[in-house]
Image (cartoon, rainbow, N blue to C red):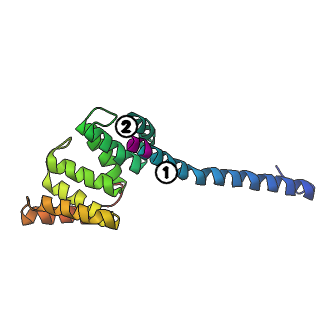
Amino acid sequence: MISRFTPCIERKGLRGAAIAVLALFACLALSLPAARADAVASANAAYARGDYIGAVKILTPLALRGNARAQAFLGFMYENGYGAPQAYTAAADYYVQAAISGNPFGQAMLGLMYDKGHGVPQDFVLAYKWLNLAAARAARHDRDYFLRLRNAVASKMSPAQIAEGQYLALCWVPGSP
């Protein structure tokens, strides 16, 4: 504890040490997201090399800690049986987590799972909702593709079902199913 009787030099030394500790914590905190991004990039590189098991090993801890990109990627791996057994239910679970976080790829893939009834009950309204959200949140090069998928689902729906899907998408907020 610093008292008013502590010499000025000691106070400055303690203040400097406190600033150094805070700076260290700030640097560590700022470097964590970059490490996660690097890990997802490493998983992507492993996938590109055909090392699917390695990609799953990298993605799993990230996905379990809530990284939405890792969750969506891992869902894709489970859906297609790359580096993990093909398991639609596990894929849908990872897609749900990514979609709730607002990841457009996770939202689109969850929409397709609802469209096909893979890992979730077939539901065109929910398929439309998630594909509509994905299209709204996606980068330009993905948006057109997601819109085509959404419109393909809409071709199987009545106008009332489309309106319901639009309403669900309009009411959705990140963090909610």
Judged left or right of residue 119, residue 75 is right
Kindly identify which residue carries mark 2. 52
Instruction: Give the x, y percent position of residue 161.
Output: 11, 61
- Tell me how far mark 1 sits from mark 2, CA to CA: 18 Å
Give the residue displayed 54% in from the left and 52% down from the top.
34
Q: Quadrant of residue 93?
A: top left
Residue 149, horizontal then vertical, whole percent: 19, 59
In front: label 1 or label 2? 2
Q: Residues within 10 Å of mark 2 (few under 14, many from 20)?
A: many
Q: To which residue does mark 1 refer?
A: 37
Q: Give the residues drawn in magenta, as a range.
A: 45-49
The tally of labels here is 2
Q: As rendered, which of 43 and 18 lies closer to the eye? A: 43
Mark 2: amino acid: Tyr
Specify the amino acid type for callout 1.
Answer: Ala
**Residue 57 on the magenta segment:** no
- SS assignment for the magenta stretch, majority: helix
Q: Is residue 127 visible?
A: yes
